[in-house]
Structures are given as structure tokens and as C-alpha cells.
Image: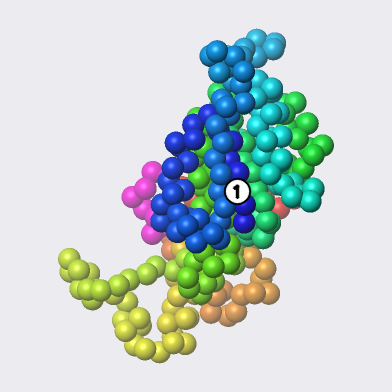
Amino acid sequence: MRLDVVTIFPEYLSPLDLSLIGKARREGLIDLAVHDLRYFTHDRHRTVDDNPYGGGAGMVMRPEPWGEALAHVMGAGEHGAVPHLLVPGPGGVRFTQAMARELAAEPWLAFACGRYEGIDERVVDEARCHMPVTVVSVGDYVLGGGEVAVLVMVEAIARLVPGVIGNADSLVEESHEDGLLEYPVFTKPPQWRGRGIPEVLLSGHHGQIARWRRDERLRRTALSRPDMIARLDPADLDARDREVLAEVAEVQACGGSQTQGTQFQADPPAVAD
Ligand code: ADE
């Protein structure tokens, strides 16, 4: 997979030299190039921003360097190939595991990291005439720029590229893969600070272990992400699943919550349209 990132802070992307993604790059599974937007400026100060038309706070990224930078990225395409351009921004569609999976199947992604108040809107409009473009948000909060969002997206996408993770089994029961959060995990030592591990995990009984893990996934999801439980297809729930969910609901109705002690509450389930 080829990845291009355009930014005014190329060093921000240096974590992509490390760990799984660094290894995938060295092994040639991922071909990642980071481009400095200022390289595509032509004035002494290498200016990339200016005041917003119409007034208001902050600065806006000028379109000219972006136009040249994106033309440079596209120029690397052979036989008319173009990248899918992802523009991180808090006003975009929400980045999800499902989107990461779809993007991991694409051969070429490019990322345009905005800073300040954003990139002149004409850049995205113009880019749409040449390649698929998606404005993507990594969550309902505002970052200082797109770089961290790109780190998030590249990490989520690259680990799904075949060969990047040695043991593909570890991708199967992950949080968000099938609408449930992950089960808790334990390793040695069997006793730590007076805390043991759930007996069933020592039983060697694969069926019981699988059931316990599903129970835990359902419990955790019901507690932290009731919106995800609301989206489950009832046809996918067996009798034991329903029992576990009823138990959680009962504990919560009585005022007890395993999430007690946190000032943050789970989002309520989304109201169906
Ligand atoms: N840039 C600023 N905030 C962002 C967000 N929430 N997601 C993606 N890019 C952003």
C-alpha cells in the first residue's frame, strides 16, 4: 500500500518509523512518503497561510501550495492511478473500524494535514475533480491540526494490511470488529498484589472460556457503549447473551454501576430515526 502525507510539520509523522508500521515500511508492505507543504511555496517566507476572507479569527491555508503539493503527489501515479485523498477535519465523517478496513483494501491513500482554521475550501473542491476525496474526523473534539488524526488513521489502517500483523487471528475478536468491545486479558503471574485471575481461564475448557469471553464483551459494551448494544441485530443474540444484558440492565437500574468512580458517563443509546 502506498501512503502520502502532506504537512507543514513532517517531523510530526516520525512515529510512523516505529513499531509495527516502521517494520512494515522496512519490509516493503507499506510505502510511506511525507511531503513538506512549504516546499511548494515560492516566497522568501515560505508562506502557507493568510487572513480569512470575510474576517474572523485565525488564519487559513492558502490554496496555491496545496494545489502544487497534491499535483506532485498525483504525479507519482502510474497508468493514470490516483490516490484516495483523506482530509482530516472535525467537520468530516467519523473515522471507524469499518472505514479503516475499507481503506486498508485500497492501494493508495493520500492525507492532507490542515493547520490553523483549515485549508481554503477550493482545494478540496478542486481535488474532487481529480480523485476521490473524503473529509474525515477522528472524534468529536478539535485538534490543533490534522497530523495527529493522520497518525491515528494510518495506525488503524496499516495494521489491517495483510502481512503487517504476524498473527492475523489477533484481529478477529478485537473491539469494534463485530460490534462489541474486547474481553479483558490476563497473563502471568497468576497472583499480583492480591489479585488472581478468573478461574475459567485456567480450566483449559475452550468452550467455557469462549462463553466467558463473550459474556465479558457484552458486559463491557453494555456498560461503556450502550449505543453499540442498541445497534446489535437481535437475531445475533443467543439466550445467554440476553441473560447477560438483562443482568447488566438490572444492576444499572438499581443504581450500581461498574463504571462508578468515573466522572464520565457512557453515551446514551442513539435514538432510532
Ligand atoms: N483536525 C482538527 N480536529 C480534528 C478531528 N477531530 N479529526 C480530524 N482532524 C482534525
Looking at the rendered structure, the kind of residue marked 1 is Leu
Is 98 placed above or below 74 here?
A: below
Q: Residue at x 25, y 74 (%)?
A: 188
* Residue 215 in sight here: no
Is 140 placed above or below 266 here?
A: above
The colour mode here is rainbow
Could you tell me which quadrant the N terminus lies in? Answer: bottom right
Q: Position of residue 250 (x, y in %)?
A: 48, 65
Is 250 placed above or below 203 here?
A: above
Residue range of the region highlighted in magenta in the rendering: 256-264
Q: Position of residue 83 (x, y in %)?
A: 71, 47
Is 14 placed above or below 172 here?
A: above
Q: Is residue 263 magenta?
A: yes
* Residue 273 in sight here: yes
Give the structural element (helix, strand or loop) at label 1: strand
Q: Position of residue 198 (x, y in %)?
A: 32, 77
Single out the residue that lies furthest toward the left: 193
Single out the residue that lies furthest toward the top: 55
Q: Which residue lies under the disc numbered 1?
A: 3
Q: Residue at x 50, y 55 (%)?
A: 25
